């Protein structure tokens, strides 16, 4: 399969969970190089050994603007372009609104919302220079419908949807072929959802039409479609991958 043939791809939070599946999928689909960005060197080294030459781990915190600028400069120097950006890195720090610490609001907004802004600002400058590119943001069903105990997370993921619509419009101006879409996953089996207590999980499953949680690869398939030329006439779209979940 070669749906990512010769593409230079960047996946934030690419070391584990959904991000790892996206990195694997892009590599299998013939990407020239997939940069897996993450904050854990051990995980990145394992991933790189496992997946081989066209995957490169890179330590990067999406809240660190100078580090992002430096990363984009290095990629430009070596490859001249970034074809695909997947803004996948995300965290949760859940609490009911009355108990949510300001620090936890700031952290979640900092990574999930401002991190997406940071990455897109620097990467889109390079895409605009080249006149083409594809950006896929990972939002969440919670950003569309809200969820008890997730004020910060819902706000961040709702913001990601609004930024997706905005950038689809902004980047299509002046004839640039830069598409921006988002995937809104439901409940997916990853280290992030391992923290959810069994009782809560049972209640969540009862609201999923397909009756089960999703697999990371099922999200990666949707990301691959939107990132690839198969979606050449799709922009400003939010693709639900949630097994028919009704929150
Ligand atoms: P995981 O917790 O398994 O993985 C999150 C990844 O993000 C890790 O690789 C982590 O790196 C990385 N990360 C966290 N903070 C930063 C940062 N500041 N800079 C760079 N990387 C960072 O999460 P999932 O795979 O489950 O989630 C991936 C995305 O999908 C997230 O945006 C999440 O909100 C979204 N999502 C997940 C759902 C689910 O059910 N799992 C449902 C809906 C949306 P490290 O290894 O260093 O911690």
Image (spheres, rainbow, N blue to C red):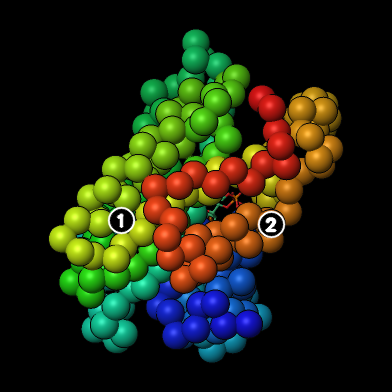
- Residue 111 versus residue 209 in the image, above or below: below
Where is residue 43 drawn, in percent x and y? 59, 67
**Quarter of the figure with residue 145:** top right
**Quarter of the figure with residue 79:** bottom left
In this rendering, the label closer to the viewer, 2 or 1: 2
Q: Earlier in the sequence, mark 2 or mark 1?
A: 1
The reply to whether dot 2 and dot 1 touch (C-beta < 8 Å) is no
Q: Which mark is residue 39?
A: none
Q: CA distance from mark 2 to mark 1?
A: 24 Å
Q: Left or right? Give the position of 221 relative to 140.
A: right
Where is residue 26 drawn, in percent x and y? 55, 74
Q: Secondary structure at mark 2?
A: helix
Q: Return the residue found at the far top.
A: 98
Query: Residue at the location (39% across, 23% down)?
Result: 102
Q: Is residue 54 visible?
A: yes
Query: Residue at the location (56% across, 31% down)?
Result: 142
Query: Residue at the location (40% across, 68% down)?
Result: 84
Where is residue 221 drawn, in percent x and y? 63, 62
Where is residue 135 drawn, in percent x and y? 39, 59
Task: Report the number of discs.
Answer: 2
Please give the residue where the numbered disc 1 appears in the rendered image.
120
Please give the residue where the numbered disc 2 appears in the rendered image.
218
Query: Residue at the location (18% across, 71% down)?
Result: 129
In the rendered view of the protein, which quadrant contains the N terminus? Answer: bottom right
Give the class, few, some or many, for how many residues have Cα within 10 Å of label 2's Cα (few <14, many ≥20).
Answer: some
- Residue 78 versus residue 220 in the image, above or below: below
- Residue 147 versus residue 174 in the image, above or below: above
Q: Is residue 115 visible?
A: no
Q: Return the residue found at the far front.
A: 233
Asked if disc 1 is less than 8 Å from ligand 1, the answer is no
Give the class, few, some or many, for how many residues have Cα within 10 Å of label 1's Cα (few <14, many ≥20).
Answer: many
Q: Secondary structure at mark 1?
A: helix
């Amino acid at each position: 399969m070669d749906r990512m043939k010769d593409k230079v791809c960047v996946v934030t939070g690419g070391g584990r969970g959904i991000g790892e599946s996206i990195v694997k999928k892009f590599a299998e689909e013939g990407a020239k190089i997939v940069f897996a960005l993450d904050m854990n060197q051990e995980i990145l080294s394992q991933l790189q050994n496992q997946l081989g030459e066209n995957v490169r781990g890179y330590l990067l915190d999406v809240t660190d603007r100078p580090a992002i600028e430096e990363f984009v400069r290095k990629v430009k120097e070596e490859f001249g372009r970034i074809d695909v950006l997947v803004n996948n890195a995300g965290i949760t720090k859940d609490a009911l609104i009355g108990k949510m610490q300001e620090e936890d609001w700031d952290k979640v907004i900092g990574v999930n919302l401002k991190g997406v802004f940071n990455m897109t600002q620097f990467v889109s400058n390079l895409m605009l220079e080249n006149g083409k590119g594809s950006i896929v943001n990972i939002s969440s069903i919670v950003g569309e419908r809200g969820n008890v105990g997730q004020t910060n997370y819902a706000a961040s993921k709702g913001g990601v949807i609004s930024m997706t619509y905005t950038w689809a419009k902004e980047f299509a101006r002046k004839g640039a072929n830069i598409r921006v879409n988002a995937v809104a996953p439901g409940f997916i089996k990853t280290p992030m959802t391992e923290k959810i207590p069994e009782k809560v999980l049972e209640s969540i499953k009862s609201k999923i039409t397909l009756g089960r949680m999703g697999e990371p690869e099922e999200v990666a398939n949707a990301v691959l479609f939107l990132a690839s030329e198969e979606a050449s006439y799709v922009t400003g779209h939010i693709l639900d991958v949630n097994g028919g979940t009704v929150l």
